[in-house]
Image (cartoon, grey):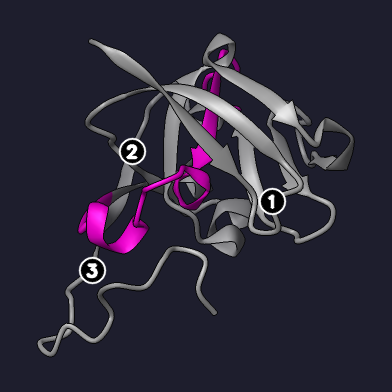
Amino acid sequence: METETRQCSCHCGKVHFEAKLPEALRASRCNCSICAAKGAAMVYLPLADLTVTEGDDVLTCYQFNTKVAKHYFCSNCGIHCFHQARSNPEFYAINAVCIAGVRPYEDFLEVPVADGVHHSKDHGGVRRMAGILRFEPSQDGSWQGRNNLSE
């Protein structure tokens, strides 16, 4: 699978990072406590394929429970940028809204939701899906044309 280096940043622009990602992005979500609170569509990539280029000193790491997953947030704007996944610590999951040019609603009309409430690491390695989250655009198209960081 061919990859391309994509530019990524938090909302305020203090954190910048590069990610080697496939051209056709696939996003997923999770229903565990932290992911449900973040509400982000995530795109996975190997650890070696993400490089923080600016603002490493602004990133804050949050860990809880097993302390395996590491969730990185911009300490200035609060945006979740990426996390090291508990299910596979050799991977990062990037918040899709941080990837330049990605429009999370338009680009991912259907997003699978992993059952993180019943995490595979706690249930014999069995991965389950909680469902699929769907976005249905309004008929008048008024949502189109906004960038992914609009208020």
Q: CA distance from mark 1 to mark 3?
A: 27 Å
Quarter in which the N terminus is drawn: top left
Residue 96 location, x and y as percent?
44, 46
Callout 1 crowding tier (Cα within 10 Å): few <14, some 14–19, many ≥20: some
* Image marks 1 and 3: residues in contact by CB distance under 8 Å: no
Q: Residue at x 17, y 73 (%)?
A: 136
Regarding residue 92, the answer to whether it shows in the image is yes
Query: Which is more N-terminal, label 2 or label 3?
Result: 2
Cα distance between the residues tagged 2 and 1: 36 Å
Q: Which residue is mark 1?
A: 13
Mark 3 highlights which residue? 135
Give the residue number, with chain letter if any, for mark 2.
Answer: 128
Nearer to me, 137 or 125: 137
Residue at horizontal 74 percent and vertical 47 percent from the top? 73
The quarter of the displayed image where residue 69 is located: top right
Task: Judge whether residue 106 is colored magenta.
Answer: yes
**The furthest residue to the left:** 139
